[in-house]
Image (tube, rainbow, N blue to C red):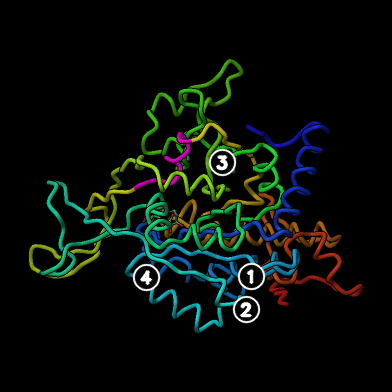
């Protein structure tokens, strides 16, 4: 487990990892997997979550923001980054149209692969299959762990192999702060000769809804927040620090060869049960989406593959720089907090480039700001791109 670097030695290790990751990127060994097949039941957003207008000023969609980051990395490293996007059967055509209507956000369409995951029936409190219409069962996607089954059934690992991809950067659609293809992270994965890597942040409180990183039978594993016992959530070590203080943020690197071995093997990921709101026919025969959970869905979690390897690399990162998911309609992890965190991120980029930006007593940037990843991914790039007489202002949008 690599905690946030404090000593010079730890910083030097990350600097070395950065170089190694950059070499892998330049050599075309990296592909990108986005899991976007969820149903956004907590957000109660009808369209696929990738359409969500996250940009604080322009309302640029999550998909656009992610695509621009990938394009920026392609430009920086002179490569094509094949992008594999998992949707579900309900959302795949709508998602394809969205990409087409937006010209694939500038990305070569031949390098964007949409595929649908498997769907499973959802059941009610009595275990009876819910109906989506009077004549069809209510189906729900089989979890982000359904990725393995989908990669296999769509023969995508072969496609990746033929393209020379060795490392797959994996992320979730709902986190606008994700550093896609972060070379430092890829480099740590390579230097540690890991099969799988995971990024973590320090949990903000014991009940935070994040998968918990722990060690089980000598190997790192993730215990979903719904499955960690109450007493374990609060358990502390000798220093009084939380024992399970690291939350997994759904950002991984996988070796392609490792995934190939897993999907061709006998073992299967277990199913977990989640209680969610699913659209279905009620007793009066009307189709309705309830506001409260009404259904049990069967989901596989991608991190359940961790115990199949002993080589896992865990890298702690700064939350404000890398993680602000959109899960709920309001409150924590909502569009409001994600936009606040994006403004803070863009503000910090400007500050890092030598400009001053107003902040309130909580340290939050008070200006509305937005910087396209195609302009800059970090403060250093930004400083180099801006003209000498540039002055930032409230409502600033920087587009390529
Ligand atoms: P979440 O577990 O947050 O689920 O997904 P969700 O479906 O987006 O939202 P809720 O729980 O219904 O409110 C984390 C990531 O995993 C993807 C999601 O799209 C998101 O990027 N995911 C989830 C899938 O790709 N397929 C699934 O079956 C479930």
Task: Kindly check if marks 3 and 1 are in contact, taking CB atoms under 8 A apart as contact.
Answer: no
View extreme (right): residue: 388
Q: Secondary structure at mark 2?
A: helix
Q: CA distance from mark 4 to mark 3?
A: 31 Å
Residue located 52% across and 44% down the image? 258
Foreground residue, 68 or 367?
68
- Segment colored magenta: 300-308
Residue sitting at the far left: 284
Q: Mark 1 falls on what kind of element? A: helix
Which residue is tagged 1? 68
Write down the quadrant of residue 36 in the picture: bottom left
Q: Which mark is residue 59?
A: none
Image-based side of 320 in relation to 248, left or right: right
- Classify mark 1: residues with Cα within 10 Å, few (<14), some (14-19) or many (20+): many
Q: Nearer the viewer, mark 4 or mark 3?
A: 3
In this rendering, is residue 182 above or below 289?
Answer: above
Q: Main secondary structure of the magenta part?
A: helix
**Residue highlighted by disc 3:** 195
Q: Circle 4 sits on which residue? A: 91
Q: Report how many numbered discs are placed on residues in the image.
A: 4
Tell me whether the residue at label 2 lies in contact with that at label 4, contact meaning CB atoms closer than 8 angstroms: no
Q: Check the image and name the residue furthest to the front.
A: 162
Spatial CA distance of label 1 from label 2 is 8 Å
Q: Residue at x 57, y 53 (%)?
A: 168
Is the C-beta of the residue carrying label 3 under 8 Å from the nearest atom of ligand 1? no
Query: Looking at the image, is mark 3 or mark 1 earlier in the sequence?
Result: 1
Task: Judge whether 226 appears above or below 398 on screen.
Answer: above
Separation of disc 2 and disc 4 at Cα? Answer: 21 Å
**Mark 1 / mark 4, whichever is N-terminal:** 1
């Amino acid at each position: 487990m690599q905690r946030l670097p404090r000593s010079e030695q730890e910083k030097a290790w990350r600097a070395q990892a950065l170089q190694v990751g950059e070499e892998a990127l330049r050599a075309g060994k990296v592909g990108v997997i986005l899991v976007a097949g969820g149903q956004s039941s907590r957000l109660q957003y009808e369209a696929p979550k990738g359409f969500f207008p996250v940009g604080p000023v322009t309302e640029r969609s999550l998909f656009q923001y992610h695509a621009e980051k990938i394009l920026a990395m392609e430009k920086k490293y002179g490569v094509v980054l094949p992008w594999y996007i998992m949707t579900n059967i309900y959302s795949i055509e709508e998602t394809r149209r969205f990409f087409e209507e937006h010209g694939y956000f500038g990305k070569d369409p031949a390098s964007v692969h949409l595929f649908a995951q498997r769907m499973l029936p959802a059941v009610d409190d009595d275990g009876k299959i819910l109906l989506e219409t009077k004549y069809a069962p209510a189906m729900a996607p089989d979890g982000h762990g359904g990725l393995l089954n989908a990669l296999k059934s769509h023969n995508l690992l072969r496609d990746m192999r033929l393209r020379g991809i060795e490392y797959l950067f994996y992320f979730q659609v709902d986190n606008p702060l994700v550093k896609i293809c972060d070379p430092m992270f890829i480099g740590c994965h390579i230097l540690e000769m890991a099969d799988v890597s995971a990024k973590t942040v320090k949990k903000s409180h014991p009940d935070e809804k994040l998968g918990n990183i722990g060690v089980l039978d000598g190997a790192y594993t993730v215990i979903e927040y719904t499955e960690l016992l109450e007493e374990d959530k609060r358990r502390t070590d000798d220093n009084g620090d939380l024992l399970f203080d690291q939350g997994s943020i759904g950002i991984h690197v996988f070796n392609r060869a490792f995934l190939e071995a897993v999907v061709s093997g006998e073992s299967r990921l277990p199913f977990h049960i989640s209680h969610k709101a699913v659209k279905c026919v009620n007793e009066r025969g009307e189709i309705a989406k309830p506001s409260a959970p009404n259904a049990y869905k069967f989901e596989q979690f991608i991190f359940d593959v961790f115990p199949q390897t002993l080589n896992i690399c865990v890298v702690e990162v700064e939350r404000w720089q890398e993680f602000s998911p959109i899960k709920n309609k309001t409150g924590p992890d909502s569009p409001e907090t994600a936009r606040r965190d994006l403004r803070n991120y863009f503000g910090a980029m400007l500050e890092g480039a030598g400009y001053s930006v107003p902040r309130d007593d909580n340290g939050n940037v008070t200006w509305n700001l937005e910087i396209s990843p195609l302009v800059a991914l970090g403060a250093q790039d930004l400083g180099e791109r801006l003209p000498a007489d540039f002055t930032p202002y409230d409502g600033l949008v920087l587009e390529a």
